[in-house]
Amino acid sequence: MRFEIMRLDDVDGSAVDSTVVDAASVNRIVQQAASIGQRIYIRPAETTAS
């Protein structure tokens, strides 16, 4: 499963940038964000039907 992780602006909470990662990478990114106090939003990435 893949997730979209958005970095949020500290002032108004709007999305500054985003990336799509696999499930194995989510924990590492959350730990990094927590260590520097960065606000992030995580949601399942949209998939396209074939």
Image: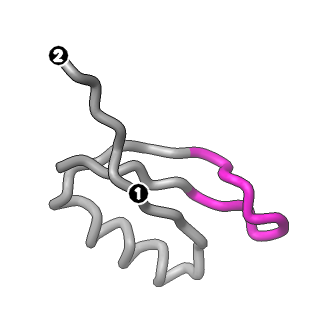
Closer to the camera, 18 or 48?
A: 48
Tell me what residue is drawn at x 65 percent, y 61 percent: 8
x, y percentage for residue 45? 34, 44
Residue 50's disc number: 2
Vertical position of residue 11 compared to residue 18: above or below: below
Identify which residue is drawn at 28% across, 25% down.
48
Left or right of 2 on screen, residue 16: right
SS label for mark 2: loop
> Observer-nearest residue: 9 or 36?
9
Report how many numbered discs are placed on residues in the image: 2
Q: Residues within 10 Å of mark 2 (few under 14, many from 20)?
A: few
Callout 1 amino acid: Arg
Residue at 67% in and 49% down: 16
Q: Which residue range is magenta in the image? A: 7-17
Of the image marks 2 and 1, the number of the one nearer the N terminus? 1
**Callout 2, which amino acid?**
Ser
Q: Which residue is mark 1?
A: 43
